[in-house]
Amino acid sequence: MPQPTAGVQLYQGKAKTVTLNDAQTVNLFFKDDVTAFNAQKHRVIPGKGCINSRISEVLFIYLRSVGISNHYLKRIDPATLQCQRAEMLPLEVVVRFVTAGSLVKRTGLPPLSPCDPPVIEFYYKRDDLGDPIVNSDHIRLLNLASVEDVAHLSAQALKTAGALHRLCGRAGLNLIDIKFEYGRHNGALILADEISPDSCRLHDRKTGRILDKDLFRRDLGDLLDGYNEVLSRLQSALLEESP
Ligand code: TMP
Ligand code: ASP
């Protein structure tokens, strides 16, 4: 079973462990744990950490190639990526192209209604509060980020989600919604954490087959089958593009 690299542990999350490598870099270990509903539902799925680390790596490399900087540096082992150290903001930035999940619950709109232009939301990462949705006034009140930072995060998240939406389209995947997390590195905000089917919704463009963590959340099928399909489709789409 893969284990986190040795060293000072900076963060123990539900699906990741972050250890310090040196003053400027960290090792991001992707666990086989999968959780939902604030960890009320939990399972260990051997192989899930390796595949999510691979999907994240592929997407971070792709984003850098289209001019979107991020914390990824290199692979350490099958479940671990070395990344730039960043002071994480306790915020999740969600971009939605189509209604699903909590947006359907909050608005009563039918599932899979287009959001045009995409909807951007912020959530405050506080397990004890159940990660509530917050607006820019709340973010300023809580002193989490400045008004300028919020504008910058919205623009960056929209641009990044747009690039991923186009890539997914070429892979025959419909990116429904996606969550990003950011940290400060040398004073600047940088895209960090992971980008995987744990943190987005992806459906087959033709059949509508669900290929993301909703497989686990809603007991819809085999999670690894879905994630492996996502990885191989992304790899094929990227291969077709390379010169
Ligand atoms: P939601 O519809 O449940 O609010 O989820 C929106 C997106 O954010 C979806 O792609 C899943 C992702 N997400 C996370 O990455 N972590 C979380 O804790 C939650 C609730 C959602
Ligand atoms: N990651 C969250 C949790 O376990 C929720 C989710 O992704 O649905 O708690």
Image: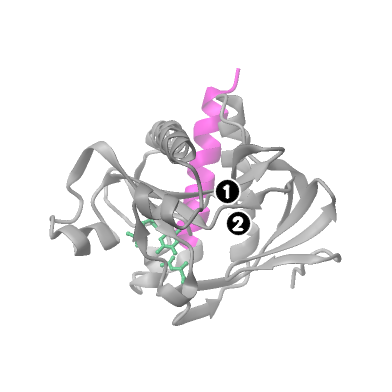
Q: Secondary structure at mark 1?
A: helix
Residue 56 in the figure: left or right of residue 126: right
Q: Quadrant of residue 9?
A: bottom right
Q: Position of residue 111 (x, y in %)?
A: 18, 56
Q: Which residue is mark 1?
A: 55
Cα distance, mark 2 to mark 1? 6 Å
Q: Residue at x 48, y 59 (%)?
A: 198
Q: Which residues are magenta?
A: 225-243
- In the displayed structure, 119 sits above or below 62; it is below
Q: Residue at x 28, y 62 (%)?
A: 102
**Quadrant location, the N terminus:** bottom right
Q: Position of residue 177 (x, y in %)?
A: 35, 48
Count all numbered tags in the image, as a single digit.
2
Q: Which residue is mark 2?
A: 51
Label 1, residues with CA under 10 Å away: few <14, some 14-19, many ≥20:
many
Depth order, front residue of 51/132:
132
Q: Assess whether residue 240 is covered by the magenta stretch.
A: yes
- In contact (CB < 8 Å): disc 2 and disc 1: yes
Q: Assess whether residue 183 is covered by the magenta stretch.
A: no
Instruction: Mark 1 and ligand 1: say if the CB distance to the nearest ligand atom is below 8 Å.
Output: no
- In the displayed structure, 240 sits above or below 106; it is above
